[in-house]
Image (spheres, helix red, strand yellow):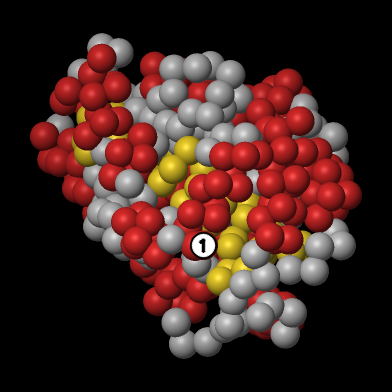
Amino acid sequence: MPNTPKVLFVFGTRPEAIKMAPVIKVFKSENDFETRVCVTGQHREMLDQVLSFFEINPDYDLELMRQDQTLYTLTSSIVEKLELVLEEFKPKYVFVHGDTTTTCISALTSFYAGCKVCHVEAGLRTYNKFSPFPEEMNRQLTGRLADFHFAPTIASRNNLLKEGTLDSTIKVTGNTVIDALFDGVEKVKSSTPSAIKKYLSRFDQEKHWILVTGHRRENFGDGFLEICHALKEIAQSRSNVEIIYPVHLNPNVQKPVFKILDNVANVHLISPLEYPSFIWLMNKSHFIITDSGGVQEEAPSLGKPVLVMRNTTERPEAVEAGTVKLVGTDKNLIISASLSLIDDFSAYQRMSKSHNPYGDGKAANRILDFIKHLEYEN
C-alpha cells in the first residue's frame, strides 16, 4: 500500500492499552490507513490481559520489562528499540497516550524520526511537576512534542491554548476510556468473569462493597501507611461494608497493605484483576477509593462516587461536577468522606447522580475523523 498513510500506535501499560483499544479498533476498520501496533511491555502481565480482552495483536513487542527496572533504563531502552521499529515501518502518524514514560519517550523518538506525533488524552495538567511523578512532566513534554492533540475535555483544551498550542491542532473528543468501558461492560454483562468467581464466596453480597486501588509513587511510604490505617478504621467501625482491595504488585504497596490490613475480617486483599473482572467489580461496588486517573473517569459513567487519594488531580472536571472528591492521603479525611457515603444516603445520591463530564463513548470516531480530514485536505 505505497500511497496509504501509515499509522503506528505505541503504548506499554494496562491503562494505555484500555484507552487506546477503541482508537486502534476504528483505525483498523478503515482501508484508508495501514495501521500497526507496537507495545513496549512497560507493564507485562497486566498489559497482556487487556490485549487479549480487546483482541489486539501487536505487530511489534519491544519486551522492555525488567526486574528492578528504573526510569533511566526504561527511557534508554525505549529510544533504542523503538528507533528500529520506526526505521522499518516508517509511519506518518505515531499515536501515544496520556502520561507514561512510554508516552513521553516514544513521542521524543518519533519526533527524531520525523513522524507526526498524535497525543491522545492531551492537555491534562496539575502544574506541579512532582504530583503526580513522573506523569505530570511526561504529559507536558509530550504536549510540546505533539503535532496533534486529542483533548478529552474543554478544560484540557484550555490548558493547551494557555501554553501556546495552535487551536487548529486541538480536537476535543471526550475520553476514550468511556468508549472502552461501554464496550467492556457489554462483554461482561452476560456472565461473571471467571477470574472473579473464585472470590465471590468470600464477599458478603448483602453489604456495601467499597473497591480500593492504589499505586502512585508519590504515596509510597507515609502516604500508604495513612491510607491503610484509614481503611482499617472504616472496616472496623462499619460492619455493613466489605472493602475489596486488588493489591498492586509493587513491593512499596504490598508491604504496608498486608502488614496493616491482612487480618481485618471485612477487608479482602486480592490479586490484581484483569480488566473485565475489574469493571465487573466496579459496577457492583457502592463507591470507590483510588489514586488512579482512569478510575476517576470510568466510575462516574457507572454512577459510582469516587474518593481520590491524591492532593491534586489533572482531572478537575469530575471534582467540579461532583462525581469525585479529593481526600489525599489524610487518614481523617478518607475516613470522614467514606463514612459520609456509607451513612448519608443524600450525600451518596448527590455524587452518584452527578453528570459525568468525560464523554459519550464516541471519542475514537472523532479522532479518526480528524485524521481523515487532515488527509483529505492534503
Question: From where the camera sits, is residue 250 visible?
Answer: no
Q: Identify which residue, 124 or 34, lies in the foreground.
A: 124
Furthest residue in direction top, as rendered: 164
Q: Horizontal and vertical percent for residue 55? A: 51, 67
Mark 1, residue position: 342
Q: In the rendered image of this protein, does residue 180 appear above or below residue 255?
A: below
Residue lying at the far left in this picture: please name it: 377
Q: Residue furthest bottom?
A: 190
Where disc 1 sits, the SS reads helix
Residue 29 placement (x, y as % from top left): 31, 62
Q: Which of 210 and 372 is in front in this view?
A: 210
At a point 85% along the width and 59% down the height, the residue shown is 262
Residue sitting at 81 percent across and 55 percent down? Answer: 261
In the visual, does 77 lie left or right of 115?
right
x, y percentage for residue 93?
A: 36, 35
Instruction: Count the marks.
Output: 1
Q: Would residue 305 appear left or right of 44 to someone viewing this image? A: left
Q: Residue shown at 36%/34% (left/top)? A: 316
Q: What residue type is labelled 1?
A: Ile
Indicate left or right for 2 with 294 as reference.
left
Q: Nearer the viewer, residue 81 or 342?
A: 342
Q: Quadrant of the C terminus?
A: top left
The crowding category of the residue bearing disc 1, from other C-alpha atoms within 10 Å (few below 14, some 14 to 19, many at least 20), is: some
- The residue at the point 66 percent across, 80 percent down is 204
In this rendered view, identify the residue nearer to me: 70 or 2.
70
Residue 200, can we see it?
yes
**Residue 101's spot in the image, x, y percent?**
60, 30
